[in-house]
Image (tube, grey):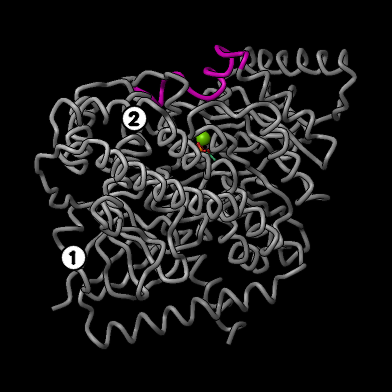
Amino acid sequence: MERYLQGMGISPGIAIAPALLFFHDRYDIPSYAVSDLEAELARLDMAMQKTRKDLEIIYERAVQELGDRNAAIFHAHMMILDDVVLREELTTHLSEHQKNMEHTLDALATRYAQAMNSVDDLRFRERTADMLDVIDRVLRHLLDAERPNLRTLDQESIIVAHDLTPSDTASMDTSKALGLIIEAGSVTSHSSILARALEIPAVIGVEDASAAVTAGTMVIVDGSSGRIILDPTRETCVRYRKAQERLIERRAALLRSTKGKPACTVDGVEVMLRANIELPLEIEHSQNVNAQGIGLYRTEYLFIDRDSLPEEEEQYKAYAHVAEAIAPHPVVLRTMDIGGDKFVAHLQILKEDNPQLGWRAVRFCLARPDIFKTQLRAMLRASVHGTIEIMFPMISGIEELRKVKEVVHEVMADLDEEKIPYNSNIKIGSMIEVPSAVMLADLLAQESDFFSIGTNDLIQYLLAVDRVNEKIAHLYEPAHPAVIRMIHQAAQAARVRNIPCSICGEMAGDALYTELLLGLGITALSMAPVAIPRIREEISHIYLGEARTLARKALKMRTAAEIKELMEKRHLIRAKKCELLMD
Ligand code: PEP
Ligand code: MG
């Protein structure tokens, strides 16, 4: 019988395939006394050599497919393997207990796991998890057991997992892994970011998926609605396959019909459509959908999942590369938004009671000028390779904006002294994502070259709804009248000063709100590349005059329900028009 699960759809598309349960299980470890210790050590060395070869292959693959930054984790694993400490510990344990090497490795792993679970230090926990990952690989070679991985899948599958590690995701065979169902995770978790970047339909936050799904169960994943259907009937399968085909055809038709065209309203007003990126491979995705630049480069992804900070040179190369690839369009580099739910273990940011209200973004950067200045130097140096703009996250008032700009000027002075070229007219923008910034938007507009509204955070702070807490997700409401008024206020302040005002939160990629956002005065939208063709098409059916009338009406409404109903009605009319045109 058909059964249903509901989670959060975080990467759009429909996937239909049998389930593959991907949970790391334990295996039987033989335990016996040994007298020839040298022979056991020779077995260990052989297994370590094989592990190194595996890691080299995975590393090379990850560099090519996911870029240096994401591949760095495997480099770290190689270093753990090469570290004499691991071999020394194993040798000591072996001579003390005189048990076979499988037993010795397993005993060491158990000890590490216990230590990891009793310590709060995030950095220690991550290092130990990496250590366990490496020990597991060696152990499997000793046992001659195949490590479960997603690199070579026998057949097309929907991967069901509690969570996916960078190692799992990086080595995933994306031609056969058609969809993802993840028990854990939030919209900003590593697996969500990568699912979107790889454009694989995915649903997260599906509690107890492992209990509901057995291996081989036929599954339908709808990565937009978050709906999962288990053991679908023939009729349901046929229906979803048709929907899937329609979706694929529609995407292709959309791309064809909008390729090379700017996004224009019916009355001829151009709207800038730009891409949000986190990974190097998204540069190509952005080019494929003809994005008019990168509206948000979340540079903090250069800093997470690695053992040390990226040096200036590495950052410079990454920024210069994207600027060159996207030229002549601009690239908006957002300075690192570390903290909140984006932790960087090696920076020793301690866990906070209220991380979203805590040591985050520019607050962190101003407290760590060494890290901040290195990033700004890299950005400024890269600015001669294309059109780079710099944007600051979580600006809450004028003092903060002035302080970060002061640091930019200090870095510029250093570069002048060293005769290093950069664009001295570089545009500097403020993210508007804290309610106080909206209240002061008229003042911030006087000292910013552009605004970009981060609705993901603005909604969280305005409505006091933690954006990653599943229990209150129903209160997270983009159509709330207060949100609409705030967007309007920020856009109007920008208009008065004649500076661009874009939106780079998830709302920008939701066609339900496109007309309203344009009516409120938004001039550019930045979103995941996959959403761009759909929004471009939506814009082609909108009259800016009508959008303004709609916005005036919405601004007078009292409840989110009323606003949503109005948006849905308008959206339905346009969707029908689009379908008529597509047929
Ligand atoms: C936002 O807050 O809307 C935003 C775009 O930034 P992030 O999601 O990275 O916080
Ligand atoms: Mg934000």
For disc 1, the marked residue is 213
Quadrant (top left, top right, bottom left, bottom right) of the C terminus? bottom right
Circle 1 Cα neighbour tier, 10 Å, few/some/many (<14 / 14–19 / ≥20): some
Query: Which residue is at the front of the view, 25 or 324?
Result: 25
Q: Amino acid at mark 2?
A: Leu
How crowded pointer 2 is (Cα within 10 Å; few <14, some 14-19, many 20+) is rated as some
Q: Position of residue 452 (x, y in %)?
A: 63, 37
Identity of the residue drawn at 62% across and 79% down: 253
| Location of mark 2 (residue) | 86
Residue at point 57%, 18% (across, down): 365
Q: What separation in Å lies between label 2 and label 1 (alpha carbons)?
A: 38 Å
Question: Residue 324 at what x, y percent from top left?
Answer: 79, 47
Q: Earlier in the sequence, mark 2 or mark 1?
A: 2
Looking at the rendered image, the quarter that the N terminus falls into is bottom left
**Closer to the camera in the image, 55 or 448:** 55
- Labels 2, 1: front one: 2
Q: Is mark 2 within 8 Å of ligand 1?
A: no
Residue 413 in the figure: left or right of residue 253: right
Does 356 appear in magenta?
yes
What range is drawn magenta here? 354-370
- Residue drawn where x is 60% and y is 34% of the image: 489
